[in-house]
Image (cartoon, rainbow, N blue to C red):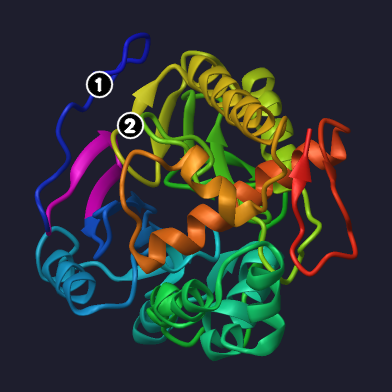
Amino acid sequence: MKAGLAFPFPAPPEPGRLAEIRPGIFWARIPLPFRLNHVNVYVIDDGDGWTIFDTGIDDAPTRRAWEDMIAGPLYGRRITRLIVSHFHPDHIGLAGSLTKRFDVPLATTLASYLMCLNTSLSPGSLDTQFYRNFYLRHGLDAQATQVVCTRGHDYLRMVTPLPKAFFRLAAGDTVALGGRSFSVLCGEGHAPEQLMLYCAEEKLLLVADQVLAKISPNVSVWAVDPDGDPLGLYLRSLASLKTEIDENSLVLPGHQLPFNGLALRASELIEHHERRCQAIADACRNAPKSAAELIPVLFSHRSLDPHEMSFAFSEVLAHVNFMLGQGAASWVDQNADVLRLIT
């Protein structure tokens, strides 16, 4: 258990079962085929049916988990609303299937909907020369680039086709769920316009992946926005959550256990990324390095499979871009075939 954080629900629900977090608000856990082997979804008793928050990925174990819940704890009442926090496949993967099956709208942010259409439903586009050049210019060799552009993006195919229309939720909106009023918040950094729901009256925050108790959410630069600063956006988002959310709130995350201690955890995550930037600065002080050459600096503790390598590379680049924007580092030669950083 992490010192300083409180975990009021020390064990997750069994597969196919629900755990009641608050009256009418339930937690389910769905398996994932990755090292991070699960995703949390939440089910809210919404009067005449169930509102679902996130879905899991599109694969056979996830579909079985949903069938078990529909035939078990959800039996007798239909799903009437589906809310998705962000476009990553472990959260939006079955959205298209569930909305079609129950004839309900998909509610999410504009960025989540469009990013899913652009990326998750067209994964083959990532194996083009444009994307290959992105990796090659930042130092991945041809073999590693081949692996990342093909096998590293397999998870993006685990998404069912989205409905042709959706219901847009935006920061500042209010959503009524199960007799409660939730404010819509949007986080940045992990995913554009990641949707969060906050009930101030009950001090309850569905935070998705913006803040996790024991790991840092992935913060990545991708080829579609090669000069973007998602880490800067993420740090600003963490600072906002520390001031906007009551420190005694119960946090319901997209992975791992619900917890109390949001401000503390946000501060820890900020310090974590500061340490990573310092590690990069130290590594580049005497010998310029590409983003690919910096992967062992931040991920030295284990070998990386293709899926993890793509995320590691893009997270390193997020720190590099942040440092460039802060004036803490610079490219040795912006016209070089391979970009290398110096501090």
Q: Are marks 1 and 2 in contact (CB under 8 Å)?
A: yes
The single residue placed furthest to the front in the displayed view is 286
Q: Rate crowding at label 1 as few (under 14), some (14 to 19) or many (20 or more) other CA atoms within 10 Å.
A: few
> To which quarter of the image does residue 111 belong?
bottom right
Q: Is residue 89 magenta?
A: no
> Residue 59: x and y, percent?
26, 78
- Residue 163: tell me if it is visible: no
Q: Secondary structure at mark 2?
A: loop
Q: Is residue 28 above or below residue 202?
A: below
**Magenta-highlighted residues:** 16-29
* Secondary structure mostly taken by the magenta-highlighted segment of the chain: strand
Amino acid type at image mark 2: Pro
Residue at left 67%, top 23%?
244
Which residue matches tag 2? 258
Tell which of 187 and 337 is nearer to you.
Answer: 337
Q: Which residue is mark 1?
A: 8
x and y percent of residue 210 in the render?
54, 41
Identify which amino acid the numbered label 1 is placed on: Pro
**Which badge, 1 or 2, is on the more N-terminal residue?**
1
- Extreme top residue here? 4
